[in-house]
Image (cartoon, rainbow, N blue to C red):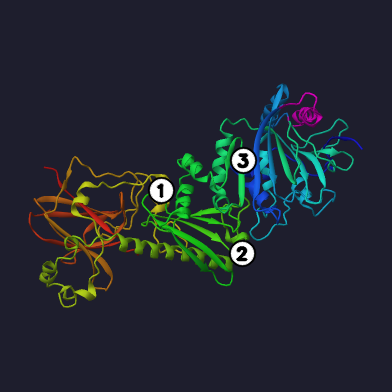
Amino acid sequence: MSICWNFPSNNNGKISGISEAGIETFRGKQLKSLAREICQNSLDAKEASKDKVIVEFELYEVSFKDDPRINGLKEYFKLAKEYWKENEKTIRFLEKAEKNFKKDKIRVLRISDYNTTGLVDSDKKKNSTWNNLVKSSGVSDKTGSSGGSYGIGKSAPFACSDLRTVFYNTLDKTGLQAFQGVANLVSFEMEDGTTTQGIGYYGNSENNTAIKNMENFGSYIRKECGTDIYVIAFSDDEEWEKRIIEAILENFLIAILKNNIEVKVGRTLINKETLNSLIEEHKDNISLTYNYYQVLTGNESEEMEIPLRDLGVFRLYLAIKKDFKRTILISRSNGMKILDGNRISGSIQFSGVCILEDEKINAYFREMETPQHDDWEIDRHSNPKEAEKIKKEFFRILREKVKEKGKESITDEMDAVGMGEYLPDIQDISSDSENKKENIENGKKTFECQKITTLEAARNSTIEISDENEEENYIDESSEEGEIENEVPSEGDFNLGDKKSGTGNGTIGNGEKLDLSKFSHMHPSSIRIFKVSDENDNEVYKMIFKLNRNTKNAVIEVSIAGEDRTIPIIIKSVKNENREILESKNNRINMKNLLKDTKYSILFSLNGNENYPVEVKIYGDKI
């Protein structure tokens, strides 16, 4: 039986081109996908008696001049170039690949796992983990919290190979050994006139089966149960170690903390003991993961076990802290990240980690996963209508928990010292005879005091407009899944609403600034902001203020007061003390002919249902 490369005939059937679907899926994020797919497969194959899986990534440069496993591919690349000579994209790939055959050595990335079962049943022709990985397309028998369910993850190593060639080597838990190469190329015409399928196999050429013993590249020899994957002509990326390390930290943070996996990338060891220093080293590039790590290891985080219908429970860790990015890591029970849940709250600075604990809830949401396993899409589920309801319920629970945690945080932070400065002015309220709801007798029923910033803070702070990478933070939190209803557009792209009616239902411009050549900042001699009920029993904000000078034109900017910055918010409606509608645009209210030391009162409502801590800045005609 001959051991060599063999490219089977397509029997006058399908022609395979360069844009193979599985490989194209991972183009543009090859190393990130490689780390994710490899580690999830190893976690799925963990030997039951072992505590954790160990994975190694090591790069060699090996001589191949007398190695038929690599050098034997040269002739097939020449045939492919002739067959595809009029296809520019394919020729570019083939010419780049051929450069590797002109070198003295070739880059080979070895990926090895330990404490796993290995690729079992390599002696069978079907229904084995060996064949599912090496010789199958779109096949997976994984369920529940396991990794890939589409069978395309096996394409990730090919996307990292300039020759699109990978070798598999295994020693399984029963002692079976196997070695085989796969070249995922393009269809081409052999010298005898037959056209190939495009995929070739190195092994027993008569039936394309594996060699029944282990082989290797370089000096490494496997002695323990597990699997080796050799990526031939590994992509030339000087930062490959850094990229893989960050991908592992991002996607397997929970698994590492649980001590379910240990990964060695070059000389860098990633495990529970080294995690803290690695997170600190790479935090600038993995800011969300840095937040999640703080949540999982911090003392101020709250841990919750939450049931979801009859699917079992998920575990949620939440923390409130300035600079948190307002996202929740959503993970399978095995510790592999699925997605970053965002658009949950636009006003609370939080971070969280959600782990789908039970097998049933893992399996249910798994049906919604995209082929890349980084999002949920309801149409992929066997029952899309039910899946839509459950997905919405899941995110609704997350939003509620974040809001509850945010309210607790605000309560804890309130300082009783000097609170009188921020309470409603009872004299001002009682003297306003125009609205019977605003008297001392029923004040407790109609007034809800909210936390606001000091006047000094308002004077010294500046409004920051988010850049395009933070658009998801500006949302209407009443939407079911945190879907964006008021995105931040580019400068000049405004929906101003009805300016005459003052509805102000537009969106905030990115970078829009007040014309400071016409206006200057004014310091009110007094100001009070609190919540009241309007004539329709809707809760609105009331602001009572006096200015320190006259101005013909005044602009009042309203923002959410954060710990370290202010966030502009849409004003839905605004009226003066005579219930006359004032002009508003985005987060600004325009008023005319204001006099020094005269009390003015306005009522305004904001977009969204949150109880926001409000901050105000007033501008008048430049002196």
Q: Which residues are magenta?
A: 62-84
Which dot, 2 or 3, sits closer to the camera? 3
Q: Are marks 1 and 3 in contact (CB under 8 Å)?
A: no
For the residues marked 2 and 3, what is the alpha-carbon distance in whole angstroms?
Answer: 33 Å
Q: Residue 149, how many percent across, how many down?
A: 67, 55
Q: Which residue is mark 1?
A: 470
Q: Which residue is mark 3?
A: 264
Secondary structure beneath disc 3? strand
Identify which residue is drawn at 71% across, 40% down. Answer: 229
Q: Residue 264, how many percent across, how many down?
A: 61, 40
140 sits to left or right of 586: right
First reached walking from the N terminus: tag 1 or tag 3: 3
Q: Amino acid at mark 2?
A: Tyr
For the residues marked 1 and 3, what is the alpha-carbon distance in whole angstroms?
Answer: 34 Å
Indicate whether residue 399 is drawn in magenta. no
Work out whether 348 lies above or below 246: below
Q: Quadrant of the N terminus?
A: top right
Which dot, 1 or 3, sits closer to the camera? 3
First reached walking from the N terminus: tag 2 or tag 3: 3
